[in-house]
Image (cartoon, helix red, strand yellow):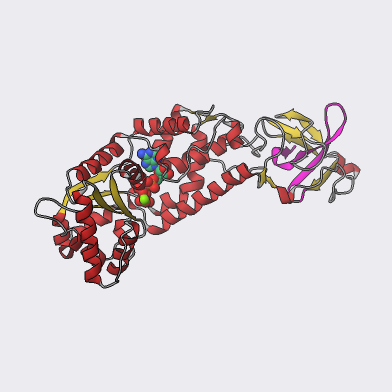
Amino acid sequence: MDYLDFFNLLEDPFRLTPDPFYFYPSHEHNEILSSLNYAVEQQEGFYLATGEPGTGKTTILKVFINNWRDKAEIALIMTPRLSPEEFLLALIEDLKITLNTKNKNEVIKSFRDFLVEHSSAGRRVIIIVDEAQNLPDETLEELRLLSNLETDKEKLLQIILIGQPELRNRLLTSAMRQLNQRITLRAALKPLGMNETSDYINYRLIKAGKGSVIFEEGARKLLFKRSKGIPRLINLIASRAMMAAYLDVSRNVRKRHIGYATRHLLDDTMNSNSGRWTRFGAKPVLAVFLVALAVLAVVAAFGTGMISIPPSGPAKAVPSKPIKEDMPVKVEIVTSSQTPPQNPEPKGVQASPSPSEVRRRIVVAVESAKLRPAPSFASEAATSAPRGKSFEVLAESSDAAGKKWYKVNDASGRECWISADVVKEE
Ligand SMILES: Nc1ncnc2c1ncn2[C@@H]1O[C@H](COP(=O)(O)OP(=O)(O)OP(=O)(O)O)[C@@H](O)[C@H]1O
Ligand SMILES: [Mg+2]
């Protein structure tokens, strides 16, 4: 049973792609969407929306584009580190304007003809620049010149700039004064509040198939506190916390799972920003992405079977100890390439202990520890032993992943193996 099966979900509810299917119309997100629609309907010309990283700007754009796809010609520039010429050509290509020349004046003329033609047919032409804080000054100036393309009656082109808050500050500099004056509508996207964070979690879970996962009240509150209501951080933490709950064989995501997830995912980011999410530098954001990618890779690997979980019990991975909020989790995972043979007489078994060693004892340190016929997580558990159960050590072994195992007798006297991760020495 994999992670999604365990929670009865159809897919990962907290993926990081800005997928319109998962769009949660929070008050903040809806306001931006409405103002965008208004700007284009009213042909306001220049529109600017800014927001901290991960607040949902690109997601809103995707929803907006879906709404306008059939009613407008849209050019979407997602990688705006382009020179004015490259930018212009990217627009031409996106709008599928055919050019007979690369002479700039001719290009602009073709562009204007295209705008006039579509305007008279009642269709809007929209240029959207995502990550617009990365536009070079000269390219911003080029955009301003393009926005001059208007008839006596109306603006021919709707320009939407979306970016991080530094874009707004850049436009306030004297060099950008002219462009700044063109902007007729501006909006700032804020993070979600506590109640909306909670609704957001429910919403995404329902979209992913509802499932049987329950985020407890305390978990939601802590998740809000840690994420500051920023959707990308909510997704990152929620996803990792669900994994921690899964490893804890719990369908309830508890406060301690959020604590665990936060520490493991975001420690560096929070520390390097003194706990202030509003001041991400490039490195911490990159760090979050890398961690996110790692998490996604692990989740994907679970899905594809690249990582196999020990095949027994409702959740097949066993944390070495119950997860506490301040305790890192040691997870028993073996990769398929590491899976040792199921042969109960494994390689690497140490010679039978001497009489003095025979007296060594171990005691189960988790709620329930699996006893397996072979020293491998791939070996189907035959039985289990409760916390506090004591065993005499008959032999020791290591599996292919270097994990230590003890040979013991179960209650009926059969020899079996128990992982060293779930016991402590008496
Ligand atoms: N309203 C929303 N509904 C559902 N998911 C959302 C919403 N807002 C953001 N998200 C999720 O949060 C994550 C980040 O969103 P998005 O990429 O749109 O942020 P962004 O503001 O464009 O960030 P950046 O500044 O880094 O580009 C994505 O996984 C996205 O699915
Ligand atoms: Mg974005």
Please say if 87 is above or below 405.
Answer: below
State which quarter of the image contains the C terminus.
top right
Q: Residue at x 51, y 35 (%)?
A: 256
Residue at figure coordinates x 51%, y 46% from the top left: 264
Farthest-out residue, bottom: 103
Place residue 407 in its image quadrant. top right
Q: Which residues are magenta?
A: 399-426
Count of labels in the image: 0
- Give residue 265's position: percent from left, percent from top: 49, 47
- Whether residue 232 is visible here, answered yes or no, is no
- Say above or below: 284 vs 34: below
Residue 70 visible, this angle = yes
Q: Is residue 296 left or right of residue 318?
A: left
Residue 127 position (above or below residue 109) = above
Q: Nearer the viewer, residue 321 or 129?
A: 129
Viewer-proximal residue among 374 and 339: 339
Residue 283, position as x, y percentages in the image: 42, 58
The x, y position of residue 161, in whole percent, is 26, 53
Q: Nearer the viewer, residue 164 or 59?
A: 59
Lateral position of residue 413 relative to residue 238, left or right: right
> In the picture, which quadrant includes the N terminus?
top right
| Residue 85 position in % (x across, y down) | 29, 69
Q: Look at the image and say whether residue 146 sits in the magenta stretch.
A: no
Q: Residue at x 85, y 47 (%)?
A: 346
Instruction: Determine the residue located farthest toward the left in the rendered image.
Output: 152
Is residue 424 inside the magenta stretch? yes
